[in-house]
Image (cartoon, rainbow, N blue to C red):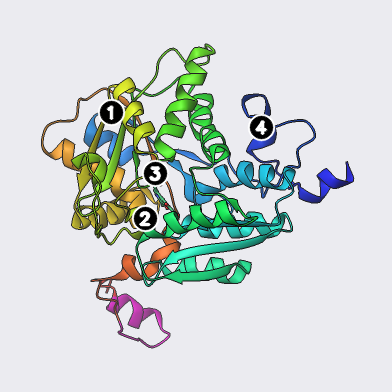
């Protein structure tokens, strides 16, 4: 009991909430930071524009600011149960932040492999401050993951990328939460996709809940990539992926087979959006719905806006969209190309009123 208390949080996390749906044994330690139970927020502006009922699942509200915490509470709890002393991951940023936080929480050493120069600064700051041992690799994410896999085979370190089966088990709970909140599954679920773990995890969650009678249907799964890093749309790996959405700058998704199966079984699709569409969607979501997400997370919004503009979005649907990470993680990209006002005025109401055009 004392041992369990050592890892618990005041708000219990998703392992306690969904324990019976997860491969967790009664004796396993629970390494938690109170993840999950994130807001499902109605989107009135998007709903009106699309003539649909649109909901946003705000995964940036997790403890380290992304959905990765759902998988990490499971993967690190299991690594702890197996006696691992260290965890390793390759990452475009969010996995490393989450792995570092959960590893130190469990008294384990985090080792993270990052593609050099391609990590948003907020995520790098997280890995540094959580105390991860950081190795910058002269290569992209796909190369980092190959190295991380080899390290885990040769040395006593637990791999916590989404090829770790416990990661997807934790991440499927986001689908449970959506159904629990709405009382049924949506018609369509839209989300970004990169290394392709999260989308099949949602599909598993939606399927399990439908099979158990907790939902009357399963949604079509629509996963969105960036045009410069769209191996799933193209149907083959991309050697040199490029996009400002660095979180999904991935050319050879490890779970492509699972993602293809989820698309096919659900009657869904993969599409790609441009970097410009991503940035525009990021600003749209912040300025109209009050939700600030990182660039990769805006890709689902971008795809829906584009489909609607092309007259290809069916009205009357209930749509849920997962926004995967917090906007504060990458403020450099959010502010790029924006002219920040530098005018400084006197501390007087008249001067301020004048400056903002009220006078
Ligand atoms: C914000 O952190 O791959 O398709 O190493 O950070 O499950 O890979 C991040 C992926 C979407 C794609 N949105 O999810 C990493 C990493 C955000 C992300 C994805 C990522 P997957």
> Badge 4 is on which residue?
17
Q: Nearer the viewer's eye, disc 4 or disc 3?
A: 3
Q: What is the span of residues highlighted in magenta in the rendered image?
A: 342-355
Residue that sits furthest to the front in the current view: 154
> Badge 1 is on which residue?
52
Residue 221: percent from the left, percent from the top? 33, 29
Residue 157: percent from the left, percent from the top? 62, 55
Q: Nearer the viewer's eye, disc 4 or disc 2?
A: 2
Instruction: State yes or no: discs 4 and 3 in contact (Cβ < 8 Å).
Output: no
Label at residue 113: none
Q: Between 1 and 330, which is closer to the camera in this rendering?
A: 1
> Badge 3 is on which residue?
254
274 left or right of 224 in image: left
In the image, residue 351 lies in the stretch drawn in magenta: yes
Neighbours of disc 4 within 10 Å: few (<14), some (14-19), many (20+): some
Instruction: State yes or no: discs 1 and 4 in contact (Cβ < 8 Å).
Output: no
What secondary structure is found at the residue carrying circle 3? loop
């Amino acid at each position: 009991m004392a041992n369990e208390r050592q890892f618990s949080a005041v708000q219990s996390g998703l392992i306690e909430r969904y324990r019976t749906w997860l491969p967790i044994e009664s004796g396993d330690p629970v390494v938690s930071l109170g993840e999950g139970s994130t807001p499902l927020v109605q989107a009135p502006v998007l709903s009106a524009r699309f003539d649909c009922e649109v909901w946003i699942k705000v995964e940036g509200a997790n403890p380290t600011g992304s959905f990765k915490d759902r998988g990490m509470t499971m993967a690190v709890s299991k690594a702890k149960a197996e006696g691992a002393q260290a965890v390793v991951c390759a990452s475009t940023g969010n996995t490393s932040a989450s792995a570092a936080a959960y590893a130190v929480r469990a008294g384990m050493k985090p080792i993270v492999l990052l593609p050099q120069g391609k990590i948003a600064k907020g995520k790098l700051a997280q890995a540094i401050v959580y105390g991860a041992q950081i190795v910058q690799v002269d290569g992209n994410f796909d190369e980092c993951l190959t190295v991380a896999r080899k390290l885990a085979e040769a040395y006593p370190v637990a791999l916590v990328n989404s090829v770790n089966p416990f990661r997807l088990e934790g991440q499927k709970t986001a689908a449970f939460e959506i159904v629990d909140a709405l009382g049924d599954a949506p018609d369509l679920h839209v989300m970004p996709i990169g290394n392709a773990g999260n989308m099949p995890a949602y599909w598993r969650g939606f399927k399990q809940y439908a099979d158990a009678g907790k939902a009357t249907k399963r949604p079509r799964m629509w996963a969105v990539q960036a045009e410069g890093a769209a191996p799933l749309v193209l149907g083959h790996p991309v050697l040199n992926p490029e996009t400002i959405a660095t979180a999904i700058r991935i050319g050879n998704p490890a779970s492509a087979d699972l993602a293809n199966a989820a698309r096919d079984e659900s009657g869904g699709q993969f599409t790609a959006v441009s970097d410009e569409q991503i940035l525009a969607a990021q600003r749209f979501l912040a300025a109209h719905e009050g939700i600030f997400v990182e660039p990769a997370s805006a890709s689902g919004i971008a795809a829906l806006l584009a489909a609607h503009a092309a007259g290809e979005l069916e009205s009357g649907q209930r749509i849920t969209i997962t926004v995967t990470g917090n906007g504060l993680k990458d403020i450099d990209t959010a502010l790029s190309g924006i002219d920040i006002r530098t005018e400084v005025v006197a501390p007087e109401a008249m001067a301020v009123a004048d400056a903002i055009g009220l006078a």
